[in-house]
Amino acid sequence: MSVNPPTPFPISERLSEQVSFDRHELSTILTLYGRMVAMGEWRDYGIASLRDLAVFSVFRRTAEHPLYRIEKRPKLRARQGMYAVVGMDGQILRRGHDLAAVLKVLEKRLIRPID
């Protein structure tokens, strides 16, 4: 009887194919999300991890189109920056290399004067 070394599990190719937010990025996004929920502006969110991008969508109500999409596209890292905030109409509101700086556009849009 011969003893064979254990066969290692194959590293899944799916892990390298999918783009997702890491823990630090999600923490930054969920901090902003929590503040906006407390203000009554946002009520629901959805996360999608796709082959080319990861998307965090923000909804006012569950059955609507997203108000904003926070996207991560690693292929744009060297050019315009891999983070972007996209409005409901598909317009890119801000793009950059730093997630916290990109998310500031959402905070500025929600500051309103009090009558």
Image (cartoon, rainbow, N blue to C red):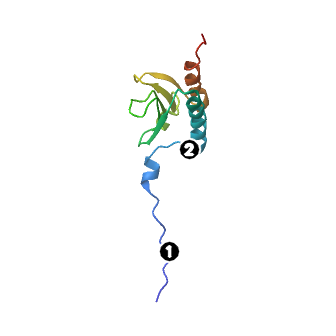
Choose top left, top right, bottom left or bottom right for residue 26.
top right
Residue at the spot x=47%, y=43% of the render?
19
Choose top left, top right, bottom left or bottom right for residue 27.
top right
Percent coordinates x, y for residue 21 in the rendering: 53, 42
Percent coordinates x, y for residue 50 in the rendering: 41, 42
Residue at the spot x=56%, y=33% of the render?
33
* Disc 1 and disc 2 in contact, CB within 8 angstroms: no
The reply to whether residue 98 is in sight is no
Kind of residue at disc 1: Pro
Q: Residue furthest front?
A: 115
| Relative to 92, 97 lies left or right | right
The reply to whether residue 60 is in sight is yes
Q: Nearer the viewer, residue 6 or 57?
A: 57
24 versus 14 height, above or below: above
Helix, strand or loop at label 1? It is loop
| Front position among marks 1 and 2 | 2
Residue under circle 2?
22
Q: Which mark is residue 6?
A: 1
Q: Nearer the viewer, residue 79 or 84?
A: 84
Indicate which disc, 1 or 2, sits on the residue closer to the N terminus. Answer: 1
Kind of residue at disc 2: Asp
| Relative to 56, 34 lies left or right | right
Work out which quarter of the rendered image holds the C terminus and state it.
Answer: top right
